[in-house]
Image (spheres, rainbow, N blue to C red):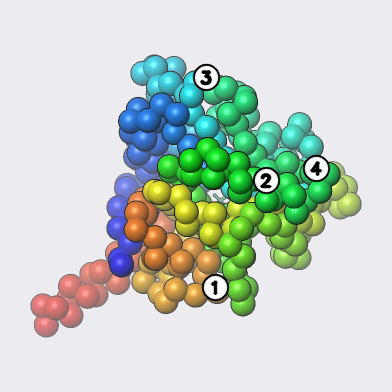
Amino acid sequence: MSMKWTVYRDYAAMSRAAAAVIAVQVRAKAASVLGLATGSTPIGTYQELVRMHREDGLDFSLVNTYNLDEYLGLPPDNPQSYSHFMWHHLFGQINIDPERVHIPSGQPEDVNRACRDYDRAIEAAGGIDLQLLGIGRNGHIGFNEPDFYLRTETHLVALTEDTIAANARFFSRPEEVPRSAITMGVGTIMKARHILLLASGADKADVVARMIEGPVTTEVPASILQMHPQVTVLLDEAAAGILMEDERRRRREDQA
Ligand code: F6R
């Protein structure tokens, strides 16, 4: 099964297209279940959804959301928490019902139970209609990092030393930097009926090509999306650089 991908001129155009896909979903089913992501990639999409809410009356009042991940140990009001990110960039600016917002708790009493409950809640809500994803430069989706195996269900992950070091700049003291996180597993993600993956910038070009054209391997967790029946990949030109080059080469070879 080959993954369909579409290239946009730049980040803004890609973000508008992503928001349009989400808006189609929400208009078709007012009580849609959306899986959402944090990171720099979806910020433009969220801005466009906020605009659509304000100017076009896009209604989120019945929408249910489940976020991919959260740092362990951070309360929701910590500015580095993914909960804070979501309220800042999206939830605080649209008419979503706070009761319908779900983000893994960064401070669960019992981590395993909280993970199990998260997957059960998604199932009880009828499953995810549309899952928004970014992709890490190493091919991770959520916090499912390259490894010898992938976990299917929502679970606790120890962050790599690289990730911890990269995050340190956001915290005033080293001991505040989270060392683990809770993430949906790849099974939870793969159960979504439609997956919308976004990638922007030249530093994603290599991993985007490996995700789409390479073998399905746990070394590139996003490559498992090749096995999903409905994935929409939206890219800006920089992120699609290697794919487009490969396509040009194939065309030249066909003509030769
Ligand atoms: C975010 C998440 C991550 C990011 C990925 C890309 O909730 O789970 O997998 O999608 O790290 O991050 P950015 O968009 O910052 O490049």
Please rate how many residues cluster around mark 4, counting C-alpha atoms within 10 Å: few if below 14, some from 14 to 19, many from 20: some
> Please, what is the three-letter code of the amino acid marked with disc 4?
Gln
First in residue order: circle 3 vs circle 1: 3
Asked if the residue at label 1 sits under 8 Å from ligand 1, the reply is no
**What secondary structure is marked by label 3?**
loop
Give the residue at x 30% y 58%. Answer: 4
The answer to whether 188 appears left or right of 77 in the picture is left
Marks 4/2: CA–CA distance: 14 Å
Q: Which residue is mark 2?
A: 117
First in residue order: circle 2 vs circle 3: 3
Asked if the residue at label 4 sits under 8 Å from ligand 1, the reply is no
Marks 1/2: CA–CA distance: 26 Å
Q: Relative to 80, is 138 above or below? A: below
Q: Which residue is mark 4?
A: 107
The answer to whether 80 appears left or right of 200 in the picture is right
Q: Which residue is mark 3?
A: 95
Circle number at residue 218: 1
**What secondary structure is marked by label 4?**
loop
First in residue order: circle 4 vs circle 2: 4
Please rate how many residues cluster around mark 3, counting C-alpha atoms within 10 Å: few if below 14, some from 14 to 19, many from 20: some
Residue 60, image x and y in percent? 47, 24
Residue 118, quarter of the rendered image: top right
